[in-house]
Structure formats: structure tokens, C-alpha cells
Amino acid sequence: MCMIYYFTPVATGRIADISFPLFCFSFLSQSTSKKMKIQVADITYRLLQDAPTASFVMTKRVEGDIVGVQVKGKGHQTTYWIERAGPRAWDSYVNDDPEDVKRDVETPIISSKKSKENYGVKEADAAVEERNYTSEEIYDAMSSQDWENLGHASSSLVGATDDSYSLGFRAGALLEHHLLCVLQERDPNAEMSLSTKIQLNQFVQEVSETYGNAKFHNWSHANHVTTSMNKLLAVIQEGGEELVSLNSFSLVFAALVHDAGHTGMSNKILKDIDHPLSKKFDDSIPIAEKNSINIALNILFQDNFSSLRNAILPGDMDKIEFARTLFQSILITDIATPDRVKLGIERYKASQGNEDPDAGLCPLSNHISDLFDGVGLEESVKDEHPDEFVVTSSGLKRCVRNEHLMLLSDVGHLCQSWENFIKWNFRLFKELMDCYRKKLCDNPRETWVQGQIDFFDKYIIPLVERCRILFPEEFSEALLTNAMNNLKLWTIFGVQATNMMALGVRNDEREDAVLVDLYGLGRDYLERIESKKSK
């Protein structure tokens, strides 16, 4: 018999002498499976990794260049073969990492723990400690970080990592917190169902697989933007503003998916090379951004996410609010198009008054049909809720808030510590160098130094100034101070830093080795300044 194993919240189950309370295996016949093979879905794979008394050797199913299989009623699924199982020797799974090692901010954590491969799990588990904490504990740890040091490697719960599973685990925790707030805003006694939790984590995994190997616009960047968005919302709430839970969830959701499917190429390059994506949308529509929206909604509306979808979008008004926030916040991230940036600034200026704004300022006027199709709204909704489709002063203020929170999250690293700024600057440099090597753009090195100065002066600092309307004064000042400090350090060390980046790319050096030297430029300077002050 050919089967795929899934966990469902029904009863108790047992495999390889392991009990799983509240779960059992359900079996789905699958014509694409193989004789005498045991295949498990991703959620089962994760649970088996946590089995307390046995360990499993599991390999991801790959046929040719296709990962996973098509499962009836669930769509395309990443699945794993169970190769063998045996007792888990956890007594010898120890952490011999020296406690006194001081790690750099945003330096990937390199653990000396023994790999779980020794005990039957093929992939080394960088997230073993995280799974000992609840989603709410992870949310609290991530939300309590200082803004400028988001990703500080002070613990495995918040430390910088490029491990896909760890990133997904954290993103799932943030989304779970905000979705629970949505449910309890509707009903104070509401709890999130197990099926919704499972589907939420499955959704995060599927989104992660849409991110490719671009040096900057990748899964790690999506998570840094998501973490930044979550922190900005926490700051706003701490400042006394009562958040609308669905809006907050939608913004965190949008941050996670905002670069889904990114090719590592700008919209201009996509058009110049006549990329297939450039043929999908009108010239007035930002290619990469609209593609990311489509990918996210296509995944969310798969049959196997019905419980998650019903939790987020039980009614038409929920669909309107969610889709509006998603489209507004992602479309505005096309900051390489001057006209789009200009319109965003005009919306900000108009939002500072109380008069009804010009309808031409609406960023969704060209996307209403796609918005309706994306979340399954009927045309009759316009008649039932006419006020939701008219540009008003209050609506414009909400739009500007959504746009500016996303814009700031997307470039948050420039307004954080020097280490965060220079890390992501290096990654963007590498991504553009990849394009240059493919003869898709000019050599970025030639304009990199002055380009960063101009970006700070003409875009980042004005953005931070506009965002003052969103945050308490102390936080707004900190944003500006961080941006100004990074601009100052770049003005001093930009040429040297760019040369170091270029040399690292040319010699194909390890990223962490290059980053240590880049971090040192700013740190050494700041330490000298502090030393002079103390004398």
C-alpha cells in the first residue's frame, strides 16, 4: 500500500514505540508514492524530529528537480521519506559551546553542538532550543529587543541566523500572536484551533520556499523586515495607541511575503530583458511587488489552508481590510520608481489635513479588480459597503500609516545599528554584483559610495522625518540618530568599506569573514570617540 502520513488532532498515535498524545496518523493513498516506503508530510517530519525517545533518518523527496509531490486535496506538498529509526542518544547531545564567547551583532551563530545527523536526523538542527519555547515566549523575546539591535545574538531565540527552519519558526510565532489577537478581539474567549496553528506553520513554510537564492531579497531579509514591523507595532502600542488587531496581523503578514518570488533583479532589469514576469502586468504595475502579492494569496487560498483562511477572513469586511492593507503596504515598496515614491509623499502631505483628498491619490485604483479576485470578494460588496471604496480623509490616514510602516520596516537596517546597516548593505552589493556579472546592469561599485550617501540624504532621513507622526518622540529621535550615525560612519568609511566588499566578492570570501572587518570599521571608530569622551 502507498501512503502519506499526516498528523490530525483526533486521538493518540504510536510509531516506532513513540506515543503522540492528541494526535493520530491519517493515511492518504498516493499513486505517486513508492512500494514499501513510508512518506511523511512536513508537519509530521517536524514532530518526528522532536520525538523524545527515538530518532528518525528522513530525507526530503526530490524527483528530478521537483521537490515534493502533488497530494489530492492539498496541492503540492514537501514530503520526506523515513529511511530508518532508532533510539535517541540524547545524553550525549551536549552543548560544549563556551559560555564566555562574545558574539557579534548579526553574526550568524556557529554552534559547536553535535549535529543531530549523529542520531539519525540528516539536517543539523539549529532550532533545537527554540522548540522548547512556546510561540508566545518567542514573540515576547523578539518584541523586547532594542530596535537598533534587532538580531543581536544574545540568545538563540533572537540571534541572527540564515537557517530557514529557525526563521520560519520565529515568523510563525509572530503571526500566531497577532492572529490570536485578531480572534480575541472578535471574541475575548476565543482560542486558536490546532488545525489553524498547523496550517499557519505550513503556510510559512510554503512562503519560505518561494524565496530564492538572491543575496539580499531572500528569506532572511523577509524575516528581518517582519521582525522590524513587529517591533514598530510594539513601539506604537507601548506609546499608548490602541492597535486594530487585523490591521497589525495584515502588516506582519505583508512584511513576510513582500518579496516572495523575488528574482534578485530590479523591475527595470525585468523589463529590459523581457522577463516572463514583465509580460504578466501592465506597465503601470510594479512587477515584483504585484507578483509577491499574487504568490501569497495563491498559497493562502489553497484548499489545505481553509482553517487558517477562515480564521483570518471570516467575513467580507475582514477580507476588505486584509486585502487593502496587503496591497497598500506591498505596492509602495517599489521605491525605485520615482513617480510611485512621489505619489506616496503626496498622500502623506494630503493626510495631514482633514479635507477629503483627491481620488487620484488612491494607490489601489488600478488594482480593485485584482484585490476582489485575490480574496474572493463579490462585486455586490461595493453596494453593501460603499464607504469602503471611497477615498476619505480617515481612509487616507490609514493608508499612509500602512505605507510608512512598511517602508520603514523594509529599510529598517539603515536606521538601526552600524552592524545591521553594513550587513544588509553588503548583501545588496553582492546581489547587484551578481546582476553585473550577468551583464544586466552597470558595475555598482562605481557609484556605491556616493549612492548610499544620496540614499540617506534624499530618501531615508526624509522618510524618518515623516514617520514622526507614528511614534513616540523618543523613538522618533532614536530613528533619526541611528540614520545620521550610519550616514556619518559611511561618509568616513564608505570608500574603504566598498573596497572590502568588492574584494570579498572577487575572492569569493566567506560572508562572516568580510562582515567581521566591516563591523570593525564602525566599532573601532565609536570606541575611540567614547574613549575620548571619558577622558
Image: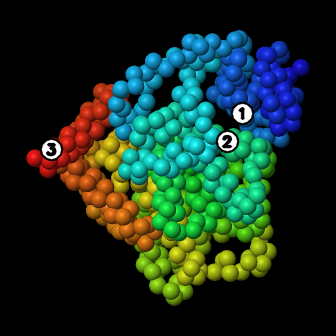
Q: Residue furthest left?
A: 535
* Marked residue nearer the N-terminal end (3 or 2): 2
Q: Residue furthest bottom?
A: 355
Placement of the N terminus among the 4 image quadrants: top right
Residue shown at 15% from the left, 44% from the top? 531
Disc 3 + disc 1, Cβ < 8 Å: no
Disc 3 + disc 2, Cβ < 8 Å: no
**How far is the residue under mark 3 from the one under mark 2?**
48 Å
Position in image of residue 428 (x %, y %): 38, 44
Q: Nearer the viewer, mark 3 or mark 2?
A: 3
Secondary structure, mark 2, is helix
Residue shown at 45% from the left, 54% from the top? 410
According to the picture, the residue beneath numbered tag 3 turns out to be 531
Looking at the rendered structure, the kind of residue marked 3 is Ser
Looking at the rendered structure, the kind of residue marked 2 is Asn
Is 509 on the left-hand or right-hand side of 535?
Answer: right
Secondary structure, mark 3, is helix
According to the picture, the residue beneath numbered tag 2 turns out to be 201
Position in image of residue 31 (x %, y %): 85, 27
Q: Nearer the viewer, mark 3 or mark 1?
A: 3
Secondary structure, mark 1, is helix
**How far is the residue under mark 2 from the one under mark 1?**
8 Å
| Residue 43 circle label | 1
Disc 2 + disc 1, Cβ < 8 Å: yes
Categorize mark 1 by other alpha carbons within 10 Å: few (<14), some (14-19), many (20+): many
Location of residue 62 with respect to 415 vertically, above or below: above
Is 138 on the left-hand or right-hand side of 302?
Answer: left
* Marked residue nearer the N-terminal end (3 or 1): 1
Residue shown at 52% from the left, 75% from the top? 397
